[in-house]
Amino acid sequence: MNHNKNIDRAKAMISIAKRAGASAVKMQAYDADSLTIPSERTEFMLKSGTWKGKNLYALYQEASTPFEWFPELFEYADMENITLFSSVFDERGLSTLENCNAPAYKIASADITDIPLIELIASKQLPIFISTGMASDDEIIEAVDSIKNQGNNDIVILHCITSYPTNFEDANLSMIRSLTNQFPNHVIGFSDHTLGTTAALCSTFYGSKCIEKHFTYDKKLSTSPDHRLSLDVNDFQKLISELRISEVS
């Protein structure tokens, strides 16, 4: 969402991520109707932060990446020689990404119990990243099994805490070791919502092989609630350097 509905900014962020040393860029393929309904009921209203007093529908309308941008952004990423893929939230998003020849898909934490969607995505026989925030052990097992039952074993399981930002004392990095023991044939990683780079670096000591971090061009902006918990280019370069040291150490 940090492109602030500006496609040139979205392209610039892809370029900056490439220069910072990112292996890939991930978008999110949704619109407001993919995620929620236009309701003013209490449970749909934001109660704190920049968007206090507005409903979730308005937030997702503002935060979404327009589907019509996707072909142009995939083409741009290809020109920049960096992998671009996306989270998928519904069949419309999946169809859009298929038309762009997306090389992989991600299932967000909130959809880890949406087995029909997971099975549909898995049937495309492309690598799948799946976040485990909010999920029980049984729900994680069911989601992974539903992918494998489609004949797809190319799975990256990401430990995740669904809290923005996540407090360090809540990061629960030992879960990465548990997932590694539970799923020895799959890559285990960390979708990190803590501030800074420390938790991401520490996750490698527990066996994390893949790191996902939110990214922005300016952490001081308030145009989206995501800016302040994201890494900017300097932070990202620092993280890459630290991860390479961890790797050789």
Image: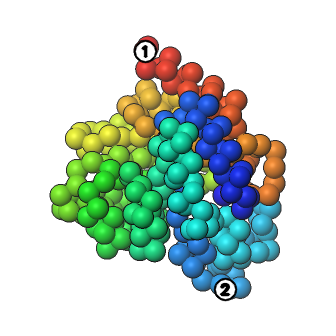
Q: Residues within 10 Å of mark 2 (few under 14, many from 20)?
A: few
Q: Residue at x 58, y 35 (%)?
A: 18
Q: Residue at x 40, y 57 (%)?
A: 101
Q: Secondary structure at mark 1?
A: helix
217 relative to 94, above or below: above
Q: Pinpoint residue 226: horizontal percent, then vertical percent.
A: 69, 53
Left or right of 8 on screen, residue 29: left
Q: Residue at x 41, y 47 (%)?
A: 158
Provide the residue designation for mark 2. 39
> Badges 1 and 2: C-beta atoms under 8 Å apart?
no
Does the image show residue 145? no
Amino acid type, label 2: Ser
Q: CA distance from mark 1 to mark 2?
A: 51 Å
Number of labels in the image equals: 2
Quadrant where the N terminus sits is: bottom right
Q: Residue at x 43, y 46 (%)?
A: 159
> Based on the displayed image, in which of its 4 quarters is residue 105 positioned?
bottom left
Does the image show residue 216? yes
Q: Which mark is residue 4?
A: none
Left or right of 216 on screen, residue 134: left
> Based on the displayed image, in which of its 4 quarters is residue 147 positioned?
bottom left
Q: Which mark is residue 248?
A: 1
Q: Pinpoint residue 26: horizontal percent, then vertical percent.
A: 52, 50
Q: Pinpoint residue 24: horizontal percent, then vertical percent.
A: 49, 41
Q: Pinpoint residue 74: horizontal percent, then vertical percent.
A: 52, 53
Left or right of 123 on screen, residue 14: right
**Foreground pick, 182 / 99:** 99
**Foreground pick, 98 / 191:** 98
